Amino acid sequence: MEIVVKEALNVNIVDPNINIIEREIKKELRKAGKRFLRETLKKMEQKILSLEKTRMCECGGRKESRGRVYRNIKSLVGEIEYKRVKLRCRDCGKASFPLDEQINLKPDKNATLGLIEQSLSLGVETAYDKASEIQEKLTGMYVSGRQIQNWAKSEGEKVKEKIEKDRSEIFDNAGIPKVEEKRKRVFVQVDGTFVKEREHDRGIECKVGAIYSKKIKESKDRFKILDKRTYASTESIDTFCENFIAECNRWGVWEADEILFVGDGASWIEKMGRDYFPESVYLLDFWHLAKNIAKALGKEHRRAAENWTKEVKKTCEAKQLLRRIKSIYPHIRDPDRKEKIRNLYKYVNNNRKGIENWRKVNCLGASGVIEKTVDLTVCRRFKKRGMSWLTKGLTGLLALRLLKLNGEWNKYWREQGVPV
Ligand SMILES: [Zn+2]
């Protein structure tokens, strides 16, 4: 269906100053955008109504006009109100709006998908109110922070459903994983972090898993990861494992010659490694080991904590570290501190293999990657000062943010019919 709309743009400049001129033109362009949209819809409706099939109902009955009804819609070119014809079938009584159907505007939407995509593109990066502010400043289109939040919830749910569908397809076609590339060595890393919950005094745990194989050295201690894929969710341990395994499957983790499984030392993660990656080499992330040592020793022994960490990194030995922890234990009086030291001993002892295996693999640059992933995926958007979440809102936005981080944002929206 071809529609041609012509409109004149009148700009009246009284002050020959570029700052005034650009502003005037921008203002007129925005007004013209709305006029164009309204005019396009009007012409389109005339054309649709002139077609005989528009009047035919699925039941075989004939539809007749029931007048025009207003609809308000927010779009990329602004918010407009337009009138469209309502038809009703004389036989079955079914009502319809042929224009809305033709332009693919669902009855439950108050905005175009294009605008929703644009708003969410900002909303996954920064706080909703801030996203609202930036969008208004740049496009002149005001959408409240609350509105973006609601879109994130409903769109995020759709993304979750899609993931669920992909996952069941993988399990239905079990045994034939799709592999594009055979890798030599693959890193699988898992970690968790707590996000503040709004209504209760407890946190929501975000579990984060990352897979990568290509790492290049940028400078002495800086590495760049080229093919990282991240999965994150607030699900239970079992569901998280299942979904993350599906991601690993799709990515071809099991086709690699060697799998290195890096954890923060938490027992559920270590168990996940054992259960799902039995042939992998388990590694304890040294960034977390350092953090745990520092926490247990306290501020006043910061220097000692640093030295212990350095030593472990160098030797990849747990024995010496366990000995050191044991030796200071009798000198500690404070019962709280004593317990912390005891817990540290347990933690190191449980992760002995994870420390000693580093010697086998010879790639210390991997340590700390998971922390950066958690920071990028969760902390920067969900753990800013003053932020707290309800599980549903958090889950939806997290799913959307992952699309961005994994470079699947445009593909997702194109599949929804948005030409991004
Ligand atoms: Zn009918």
Image (cartoon, rainbow, N blue to C red):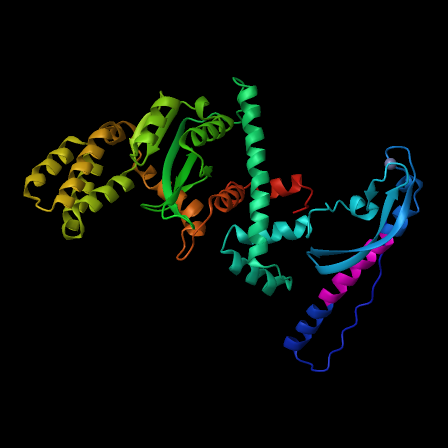
Q: 191 above or below 303?
A: above
Residue at image coords 36%, 27%: 272
Indicate left or right for 96 with 268 as reference.
right
Nearer to me, 5 or 164: 164
Q: Position of residue 292 (x, y in %)?
A: 23, 42
Assign the magenta stretch its main secondary structure. helix
Quadrant where the N terminus is found in the figure: top right
The residue depicted at 78 percent of the width and 47 percent of the height is 100
Q: Quadrant of ligand 1?
A: top right
**Looking at this view, is 217 or 138 the one in front?**
138
- Report the magenta residues as a range: 29-44
- Residue 59: x, y in percent? 87, 32
Whole-percent x, y for residue 307 in the image: 16, 44
Residue 264 falls in image quadrant: top left
- The question of residue 367 being in magenta is answered with no
For the point 55% across and 37% down, which residue is it? 160
Name the residue at the top extreme. Answer: 175
Q: Is residue 214 visible?
A: no
> Of 85 and 358, which appears nearest the observer?
85
Residue 211: quarter of image = top left
Quadrant hosting residue 369: top left
